[in-house]
């Protein structure tokens, strides 16, 4: 009888857990088959467009309006687990899960493939600016000249980097590459991708790195560790620590992304929790001299005591008092999902954007003067359909979909491909050749044989 009672209890508990799991899925919008297929979401360098990769292909959306999500292009021929667009040009770099060691460079508006390269191991990340394209493998990094796709330099035997963590400055004048210098502590290696030499190593955290981001002008780098409680900002040239922010005190927080605003005044940070933090990069104001009566208050006494005891307290304690707090925050309708955040100027207004693996782009208002809690202004489905929920109470304005350009076939000649890459980029090469049939020009990768 007791055994039967225990069995009933186990079954009941199992049903409760199953129902809770179903409710979890419902709140995360992952029951939509289309959303469940999303592999990859990422903003381009100036946050003017969003790329979405899935099992059925990839889509590129314009972010020129908050009221509608305009689909610029859609390709439904193969899956895409990495898709990177070069600013507002037609040049994209993509990797499919069916061929994870092959990088394809395409002119998406024409639907044509310019070239492709195969590597010795799985491609974990691709970064690009107007001068360089970087391919990250687990223990090496390949730096290409984006104008002719020649491999200029290979950084070999890097510490194991299973997450493919690296970032490339979007500024071609300060064209720096950052990647982990260790897999046991939080060292940031800064590499000059123009002069092809190591610049500096920054001891950023005690724990291994989890996220990296350059400021738009390439002079600052933001870092977060696997511990996920502190965000730091360093000067790229000499490694000086400029800012330190406390994200929270929770353990086991996995930072998803870091991103600067275009003016470098704000830095946003998202994680596997439901909260996105926005920090303001401004020097702390000097504390005015307190009147005698205020010094008698509890807070006045505490502040005075901490200041006076700074030389005696452990450094960990004084560090906590000196760390900046979030200027603004966002509470997402989900947690535990992969996401990427960005601060973008859309229609002359600064917005916080969060693109998530649940298949939605969330647009939030950001009060640049007062900060505080950001309100959800709009949410868009990443399958291109108009979402029924209008967070700002504005009438729906249509899906804004545009017909995708059908793929065009071109001859696989050297001159054709050279002209393709000129047409795709906004900064065409002034000189040089683009010889795809010369294996010696692209060591150690191999050209396609299909």
Image: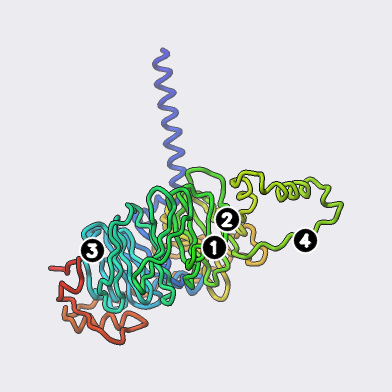
Q: Earlier along the polypeptide chain: callout 3 or callout 1?
A: 3
Crowding around mark 1 (Cα neighbors within 10 Å: few <14, some 14 to 19, many 20+) is many
Image disc number at residue 102? 3
**Quadrant assignment for the N terminus:** top left
At mark 4, the secondary structure is loop
Q: Toward the viewer: 337 or 284?
A: 284
Residue 43's place in the image compared with 438, above or below, is above
Q: Nearer the viewer, mark 1 or mark 2?
A: 2
Crowding around mark 3 (Cα neighbors within 10 Å: few <14, some 14 to 19, many 20+) is many
Q: Residue most toward the right?
A: 293
Q: Residue 41: in sight, yes or no?
A: no
Image disc number at residue 394? none
Spatial CA span between label 4 and label 1: 27 Å
Spatial CA span between label 1 and label 2: 10 Å
Quadrant of the image occupied by residue 74: bottom left
| Residue indicated by mark 2 | 245
| Residue indicated by mark 4 | 288
Q: Toward the viewer: 229 or 379?
A: 229
Crowding around mark 2 (Cα neighbors within 10 Å: few <14, some 14 to 19, many 20+) is many
The residue sitting at 44% across, 27% down in the picture is: 12
| Residue indicated by mark 1 | 267
């Amino acid at each position: 009888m007791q055994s039967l009672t225990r069995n009933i209890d186990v079954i009941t508990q199992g049903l409760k857990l199953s129902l809770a799991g179903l409710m979890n899925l419902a709140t995360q919008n992952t029951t939509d088959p289309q959303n469940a297929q999303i592999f990859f979401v990422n903003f381009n360098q100036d946050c003017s467009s969003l790329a979405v990769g899935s099992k059925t292909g990839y889509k590129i959306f314009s972010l020129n309006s908050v009221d509608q999500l305009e689909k610029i292009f859609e390709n439904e021929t193969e899956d895409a687990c990495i898709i990177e667009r070069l600013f507002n040009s037609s040049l994209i770099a993509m990797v499919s899960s069916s061929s994870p060691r092959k990088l394809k460079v395409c002119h998406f508006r024409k639907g044509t493939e310019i070239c492709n390269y195969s590597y010795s191991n799985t491609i974990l990340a691709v970064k690009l600016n107007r001068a360089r394209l970087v391919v990250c493998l687990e223990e090496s990094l390949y730096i290409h000249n984006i104008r002719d796709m020649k491999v200029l330099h290979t950084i070999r035997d890097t510490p194991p980097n299973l997450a493919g963590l690296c970032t490339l400055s979007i500024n071609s004048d300060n064209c720096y590459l950052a990647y982990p210098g260790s897999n046991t502590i939080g060292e940031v290696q800064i590499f000059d991708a123009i002069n092809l030499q190591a610049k500096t190593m920054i001891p950023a955290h005690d724990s291994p790195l989890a996220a990296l981001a350059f400021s738009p002008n390439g002079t600052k780098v933001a870092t977060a560790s696997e511990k996920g409680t502190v965000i730091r900002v360093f000067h790229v040239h000499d490694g000086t620590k400029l800012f330190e922010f406390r994200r929270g005190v929770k353990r086991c927080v996995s930072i998803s992304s870091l991103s600067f605003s275009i003016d470098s005044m704000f830095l946003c940070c998202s994680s596997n929790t439901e909260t996105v933090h926005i920090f303001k990069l401004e020097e702390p104001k000097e504390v005015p001299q307190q009147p005698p009566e205020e010094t008698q208050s509890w807070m006045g006494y505490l502040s005075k005591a901490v200041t006076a005891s700074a030389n005696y307290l452990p450094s960990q304690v004084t560090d906590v008092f000196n760390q900046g707090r979030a200027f603004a925050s966002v509470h997402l309708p989900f947690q535990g999902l992969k996401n990427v955040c960005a601060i973008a100027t859309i229609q002359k207004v600064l917005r916080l954007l969060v693109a998530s693996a649940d298949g939605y782009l969330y647009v939030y208002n950001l009060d640049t003067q007062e900060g505080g809690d950001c309100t959800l202004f709009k949410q868009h489905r990443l399958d291109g359909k108009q979402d029924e929920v209008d967070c700002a109470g504005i009438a729906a304005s249509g899906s804004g979909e545009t017909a995708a350009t059908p793929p065009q076939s071109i001859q696989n000649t050297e001159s054709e491909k050279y002209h393709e890459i000129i047409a795709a980029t906004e900064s065409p090469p002034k000189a040089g050749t683009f010889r795809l049939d010369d294996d010696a020009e692209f060591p150690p990768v191999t050209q396609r044989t299909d």
